[in-house]
Image (cartoon, rainbow, N blue to C red):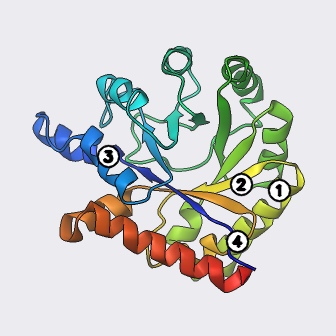
Amino acid sequence: MPARHLRLYVNIDHVATLRQARGGIEPSPLEAMQICEAAGADGITVHLREDRRHIQDADVEKLATSITTFFNFEMACVDEMIDLALRIKPSQVTLVPEKREEVTTEGGLDVVRESARVERAIARLKNDGIEVSLFIDPDPDAIKMARKLGAHAFEMHTGDYANHPNDKSTLGALVEGAKIGAGEGLSVYAGHGLTVGNVGPVAAIPEVTELNIGHSIVSRSIFVGLTQAIHEMRKAMDAARRSVEI
């Protein structure tokens, strides 16, 4: 049978990182979004961090009214961001952990320890018609808690796998986590540290329906352009998907 389409949401945070290095107006995340959509991206992801190190409030405002595919808004589970999300109404909010001192997100949201706060945030967002995904480690307890808290989906943090792709246990955790999540009735997504070279085994997990990939695509685009970088990632994802579904 034909392979099920695996969605690719392109994270454009690091387009803004490059802009912020000079404090000017180029490169433009809005222009990057337009190129990504034209190149076949199924959606756009941005993370407005509390320290505003890359994406800025003005970027989010412009993107919210310009994206024609799907807007996945990553944010910390804090009132400031929840209020903003309720105002701009993205297609989906992904709640993520955030530490000001970290270079990039280092792990999944601790939904067990912070269950009350996360549950309140999910309820506020869902009450306004916004779907909510949780960025968590592929831990069975965390996945089951995501369901209890009312999330419609979870995104598995693939950092351990990306850092140790030859360690079978890291991929095994993702495979098992995907099965558990699907069994709980959750949509299963994945992302963090994925590249053309390592995306195949994750794309081949049948329960995974969406990948969020940013840094490797933006990095590759320096050499081949954003459109070609997206096409290369799409090709790698689709090849892996076909290998298990045909």
**Badge 3 element:** helix
Q: Earlier in the sequence, mark 1 or mark 3?
A: 3
How many residues crowd around disc 2 within 10 Å: few (fewer than 14), some, or many (20 or more)? many
Residue 236 got which mark?
Answer: none
Residue 31 to residue 82: above or below: below
Residue 124 position, x and y percent, is 69, 17
Tag 3 and tag 4, C-beta contact below 8 Å: no
Residue drawn at x 71%, y 23% is 126
Residue that numbered label 4 is attached to: 205
Residue drawn at x 66%, y 41% is 134
Tag 2 and tag 1, C-beta contact below 8 Å: yes
- Looking at the rendered structure, the kind of residue marked 2 is Val
Residue 188 got which mark?
Answer: 2
Question: In whole angstroms, how far apart are the C-alphas of marks 2 and 1?
Answer: 7 Å
Tag 1 and tag 4, C-beta contact below 8 Å: no
Residue that numbered label 3 is attached to: 34
Location of residue 170 by image quarter: bottom right
- Looking at the rendered structure, the kind of residue marked 4 is Ile
- Looking at the rendered structure, the kind of residue marked 3 is Gln
Residue 182 got which mark?
Answer: 1
**Badge 1 element:** helix
> Is residue 66 something one can see in this rendering?
yes
Question: In whole angstroms, how far apart are the C-alphas of marks 3 and 2?
Answer: 26 Å
Left-right relation of 34 to 44: left
Location of residue 214 by image quarter: bottom left
Depth check, mark 3 against mark 4: the one in front is 3
